[in-house]
Image: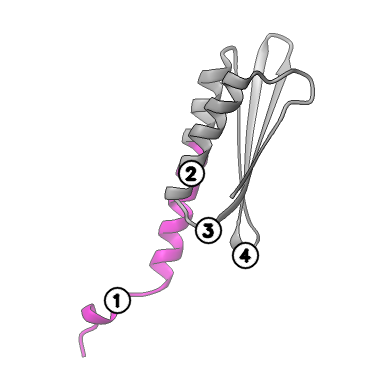
């Protein structure tokens, strides 16, 4: 899994980068087909904008963004949104597969 952190209009400190990589690496447990995660940090006026783009197998792309005055809170809200999307997608894929063989009644 590749993790890319981009900040076109600001500099990223090591503390912010470590926190982002630590939290984002846990997204794999929600959906194990995650291939790349791109985190884009930006500052617009007095607010920060965080956008997380997750690319999974079979061209599935999940995007979440959030604006807030605190970057860490913005990151947490964005992670909540993206984890919810990944959980819903995994449930949808699992429900399409049908029941396991031991539960089939003939």
Residue position marked by numbered label 1 in the rendering: 100
Mark 1 neighbour class, 10 Å CA radius: few under 14, some 14 to 19, many 20 or more? few
Which mark is first along the chain, 2 or 3? 2
Label 3: state its secondary structure: loop
* Nearer the observer, 34 or 61: 34
Which residue is at a point 55% across and 22% down the rendered structure image? 74
Label 2: state its secondary structure: helix
Labels 4 and 3 touching (C-beta < 8 A):
yes
Is the residue 50 above or below the residue 105 in the image? above
Labels 2 and 4 touching (C-beta < 8 A):
no
Residue position marked by numbered label 3 in the rendering: 33
- State the CA–CA distance, disc 1 to disc 3: 21 Å
Which residue is situated farthest in the right direction here? 9
Which mark is first along the chain, 3 or 1? 3
Mark 3 neighbour class, 10 Å CA radius: few under 14, some 14 to 19, many 20 or more? some
Is the residue 12 above or below the residue 3 in the image? above
- State the CA–CA distance, disc 1 to disc 4: 23 Å
Indicate which disc residue 27 carries.
Answer: 2
Which mark is first along the chain, 3 or 4? 3
Which residue is situated farthest in the top direction here? 46
Labels 3 and 2 touching (C-beta < 8 A):
no
Residue position marked by numbered label 4 in the rendering: 58
Magenta segment: 81-106
Which residue is situated farthest in the front direction here? 14
Q: Nearer the viewer, mark 2 or mark 4?
A: 2
Residue 45 x, y percent position in the rendering:
74, 11
| 14 falls in the magenta region | no
């Amino acid at each position: 899994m590749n993790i890319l952190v981009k900040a076109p209009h600001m500099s990223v400190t090591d503390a912010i980068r470590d926190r982002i990589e630590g939290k984002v690496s846990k997204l794999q447990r929600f959906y194990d087909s995650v291939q790349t995660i791109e985190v884009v940090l930006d500052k617009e006026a007095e607010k920060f904008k965080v956008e997380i783009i997750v690319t999974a197998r079979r061209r599935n792309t999940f995007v979440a963004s959030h604006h807030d005055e605190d970057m860490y809170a913005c990151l947490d809200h964005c992670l909540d949104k993206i984890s919810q999307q990944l959980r819903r997608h995994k449930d949808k894929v699992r429900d399409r597969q049908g029941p396991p063989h031991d539960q089939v009644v003939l």
